[in-house]
Image (cartoon, rainbow, N blue to C red):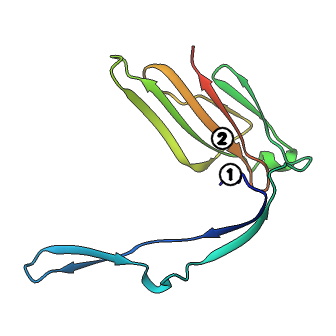
Amino acid sequence: MPMSANGTITLMAQARFETLIIGSNGQRVTTGGPGPFADRWPTLRITAQTSVPAGYALTLRQNGPRVTIIAPPEARSRLSYLYLVTCQDSAGMGRTEGISLVWQPLAGTEMSEPACPGTQVTWTYAVGAPGYAIASGVYRAP
């Protein structure tokens, strides 16, 4: 998760525990609540800084729909990415999109715009590695 603040940050997990019950009339009803945690959610405190220490930066070089990642040698085998790509459909009526909101391992130090069948393609992406800064960019097809 990208961090944009300095200092101590508290991360807290939350969930909703749902139960399916059958009402007196036979109708199914879902109820929910905090479950066993009851306002005592697991938390983690970390210290973050927004400046990137020397040697922990990732740099992206975009050449059209291809991106080259410049990373320290220790980070190259642990690179991951996520993206969103949108485009106008072939009839010019609506938008289609592809999305990866989960960090995916990246094989190598290059990536290309994902396919999107249509025009007005916009590819927004981010690249990171554990312990290194996250770099991001946007490509708009001509």
Q: Name which residue lies at 37% across and 18% down.
A: 90
Instruction: Look at the numbered disc 2 and give the secondary structure of its residue.
Output: strand
Three-letter amino acid code at the position of disc 2: Ala
Give the answer, above or below, for where 113 lies relative to 40: above
Where residue 131 sits, quadrant-wise, is bottom right
Give the answer, above or below, for where 47 lies relative to 69: below
Q: Position of residue 65 (x, y in %)?
A: 63, 23
Question: Which residue is label 2 attached to?
Answer: 126
Three-letter amino acid code at the position of disc 1: Pro
Instruction: Look at the numbered disc 1 and give the secondary structure of its residue.
Output: loop
Depth order, front residue of 112/31? 31
Mark 1 in CB contact with mark 2 (< 8 angstroms): yes
Question: Which residue is label 1 attached to?
Answer: 2
Depth order, front residue of 23/118? 23
Q: Disc 1 vs disc 2: which is toward the camera?
A: 1
Give the answer, above or below, for where 60 lies relative to 23: above
Residues at marks 1 and 2, CA–CA distance in whole angstroms: 10 Å
Depth order, front residue of 40/55? 40
Q: Is residue 66 left or right of residue 76?
A: left
Q: Name which residue lies at 89% across and 50% down.
A: 53
Q: Name which residue lies at 68% across and 73% down.
A: 44
Q: Position of residue 33 (x, y in %)?
A: 38, 78
Residue ranking furthest to the top? 142
Q: Position of residue 96 (x, y in %)?
A: 40, 30
Q: Is residue 105 left or right of residue 27?
A: right
Q: Residues within 10 Å of mark 2 (few under 14, many from 20)?
A: some
Looking at the rendered image, the quarter that the C terminus falls into is: top right
